Image (cartoon, grey):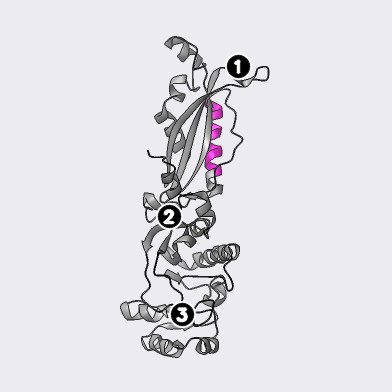
Amino acid sequence: MMSNQLKEKRSNVKLIASVLESEMEHNQVYRDSMKNIQRIRQNGHDLMFEVDATKLQDSLGSDVMLDRIQWNFPHWRGKNNHKRNRKLLSDFFTSSKDFLSDGGQIHLALRNHQGGMTSTTNIEWRASWFPAIYAGENGLLLSHLLPYRPEYKLSAYQFRDRPFFAQKESYMHIFTKINKDGGGWMEAPKDIQLYSYFTLFISLPIAADEKKDESERHCMADGDIWSNHDILDTDFVLDVIRRNVPAGIRAEIKQWRILREKTSTSDVKLGKWKVVEYQVVLFGETVPLTFESVERHKKMIEDEVQQKALGTRRGAWKASHVLPVSILQARGWWD
């Protein structure tokens, strides 16, 4: 029992150990049950039985606040099923977030393929349980990803007293609750941040292949309308993006290419080179990143672009799904 090992190492911790089974069922299934229960109680800690981690409000009440909730190797009660295990984690984060103090943490031990944070392809990521996604939807930021090797006997395989082996490629995923003002207590390291990307199109007031003198260029970009020089300046466009995303979200961009303009009367192959395409990537640095939040930021950015770059049309594609940054690294974004 992990709780018994923890109480021996950290005597200053006030521990509430819990299991899903009733005390009678636990005693019947696990041969060390009564011994571990006795040790935990002798050290002044609490034990709770029949606790559903997806419905903590039914067991803890409304006045309990915790600094840390730890769940090692959660698994749906049955054969391996990604859909059910994802729902298990989603419901757990929804249930547990209200019992965490500001800056409180959830420690979740998972096998590497279950956590998915070292995935290098979309296929590997889709085979995971998406814990960082579900945590982010509940205001929790993945702030640490640490190799984890349990030192206690793992003996709860599918609710039987049968060992399972998690020593290889297991990680402790630590999720930190952000404060009420929306800022982060902690900055996630760049190699475990989540990201989402989208394409930003900006129309040039003067076709890129047309020669105009500088006075005419600025005349056409009089007032608040952006000039060719502005739109082709990566730093200028990056500043536009940054003022439309909140603190805690990091942005990076690349100028991808210049496209021909398609008009209602001409084929795209005959159009002028008038549309600049930028690749925009947003990262959750101190604020959790979700698909819904990226779509909101994307809309705000596109609203300003449409106001300041005449003729710009809103992109038809949505932002990408939220992914671990390891996939972006594998794609050579920083090469």
Check the image and report above or below for 252 versus 66.
Answer: above
Q: Where the C terminus falls, by quadrant?
A: top left
Image coordinates of residue 290 in percent, x first then y, are 52, 50
Q: CA distance from mark 3 to mark 2?
A: 27 Å
First of labels 3, 2 by sequence position: 2
Q: Is residue 104 left or right of residue 8?
A: right
* Corner quadrant of residue 84: bottom right
**What's the residue type where badge 1 is placed?**
Leu
First of labels 2, 1 by sequence position: 2
**What's the residue type where badge 2 is placed?**
Thr
Q: Considering the whole magenta stretch, tell me its main secondary structure.
A: helix
* Corner quadrant of residue 262: top right
Query: Which residue is at 46% across, 43% downward?
Result: 282
Which residue has dot 1 on it?
Answer: 270
What is the secondary structure assignment of the residue under circle 3?
A: loop
Which residue has dot 2 on it?
Answer: 118
In contact (CB < 8 Å): disc 3 and disc 1: no
Numbered circle sitting on residue 155: 3
- The magenta-colored residue range is 295-308
Image coordinates of residue 39 in percent, x first then y, are 38, 88
Q: Is residue 115 left or right of residue 186?
A: right
What is the secondary structure assignment of the residue under circle 2?
A: loop
